[in-house]
Amino acid sequence: MTGPPRQGRAGSFLRDELAFWKKRVAAWPWWVHVVVLYALARLYSLFVFLAVARQQGPSPWGGSHPGYLSFIGIWDSAWYEQIYRDGYPSEIPRAGDGQAQENPWAFYALFPAIIRGLNAATGLDWEVLAPVAATLAGFVAAVIIYRLFRLYTGHGTALWAVGFVAVFPVSPILQVPYAESLNLALLAGSLYLVIGRRYLMAVPVVLLMCLSRPTGVPFAAMMGAYLLWRLWRRQQGELQTPEFLRIVALALVSCAGALIWPALAWAVTGEMDAYTATETAWRGDDLVLFMPWFDMGKDLFGPVGGVLAPLVLVAAAVLCLSSGPARRIGMELRLWCVAYAAYLFAFLHPQTSTFRLLLPLFPLALVAAMASRSTAYRVCLCVMFLAGQIVWVAWLWSWAELPGGGDYPP
């Protein structure tokens, strides 16, 4: 008699090896799963940056073919570095017509302040400390987001959802000297504490979040809506007076936190509109609520399409957040998504930077993971996101001067 075919023995050996390693990996602590997953995502983004940097020509920040640290130190990274080295101006620079010009007051102080503290402790400079700190903040954000998602689902689905956040097309921003990763960690921590009803513990986290990026206004709106929701459910005996007072305290702190940065800009410059005037400097005109979306829609789709396009976006957001998977992520996360989306719709001037500003809607990654348990669906979504990273870095992060001057910002 002859033994089984060699190919069959080889296939059996491979299956056994895969089963063995699958069991070994499954036995790792949850945090190892999260850290390894996030590290692989950032390693992929590093290779994307390196590949695109080889094609980069001269830019306003340096010559051709920059190294990794130089390449990720462009765009708004240069503003943060200026704040790190020189602080903020005591006067708002203005053109001859009185219009505010672009200046550091548009960028919040927490991230450069942390780098300055690390510089005092280590002696290392911005070019090394800033990307390292941003990348580490991204790891912290991934761990907190996983713990947040585990409040609603099992380990596997939560890990897939963290993976979606880690490979999202704009996720390379989480390892460059921007404040996005720091803000994401603080935002996730704030939401985790609110959902756990540890409102007083959330106070310092929310205040730090409000000093990292402009997420204070939508968070304050979310807390107001959350308070009303809890009051409505009070008839079911779910809200006692001590907890009510703690919610009110956090809501008031959130409102105050949203005003900290504009108030600081006013105090330093003596101009009440220092922050808002600076923010509108990138637009070239005054802020009119909601209208930029319709104006951009008209530019892209014509008069009729310009009116309909923003309404279609709103309808799509409503359908998404009222879907079955969205209802499973809890009212608190849904309220945050509604508040932040409404904030973008009211205040944002839509442009290519809008993609990056979608990161705080990270709870939708859990909605996507809950939409189907199909491995094929989840893998395909990850592959699409990984391909999207190449598009985002090559199109928006890389500098290529437009015919009229400048380039689309990331």
Image: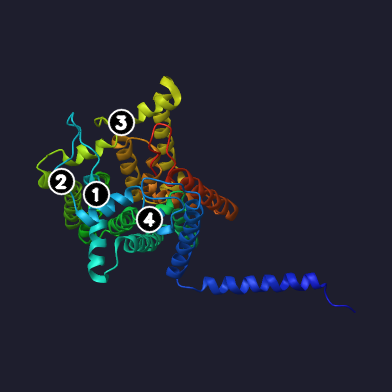
- Name the element at disc 1: helix
The CA span between labels 3 and 4 is 30 Å
Seen from the viewer's position, the closer of residues 333 and 40 is 40
Question: Disc 4 to disc 2, how far (Cα)?
Answer: 26 Å
Q: Mark 3–mark 4 contact, CB under 8 Å?
A: no
Instruction: Provide the residue designation for mark 4.
Output: 176
Q: Give the residue number, with chain letter if any, for mark 3.
A: 290
Marking on residue 308: none
Residue 114 at what x, y percent from top left?
Answer: 25, 61
Name which of mark 3 and mark 2 comes first in the sequence: 2
Q: Residue at x 59, y 73 (%)?
A: 21
Q: Which residue is mark 1?
A: 234
Which one is in front in this view, the residue at disc 1 or the one at disc 2?
A: 2
Task: Point out the tag, 3 or 1, that comes first from the N-terminus.
Answer: 1
Circles 3 and 2: CB distance less than 8 Å?
Answer: no
Instruction: Say which label, 3 or 4, has the lower sequence index.
Output: 4
- Report the quarter where the C terminus lies: top left
Q: Which residue is mark 2?
A: 265
Amino acid type, residue under disc 3 in the picture: Phe
Residue 287 location, x and y as percent? 25, 32
- Residue 193, quarter of picture: bottom left
Classify 10 Å Cα crowding around label 4: few (below 14), some (14-19), many (20 and above).
many
Q: Which label's residue is closer to the chain start, 4 or 2?
A: 4
Q: Residue furthest bottom?
A: 1
Q: Residue at x 23, y 43 (%)?
A: 103
Left or right of 286 on screen, residue 385: right
**Cα distance in 3D space between marks 1 and 2:** 40 Å
Mark 3–mark 2 distance (CA, rounded to whole Å)? 25 Å
Q: Secondary structure at mark 2?
A: helix
Q: Amino acid at mark 4?
A: Val
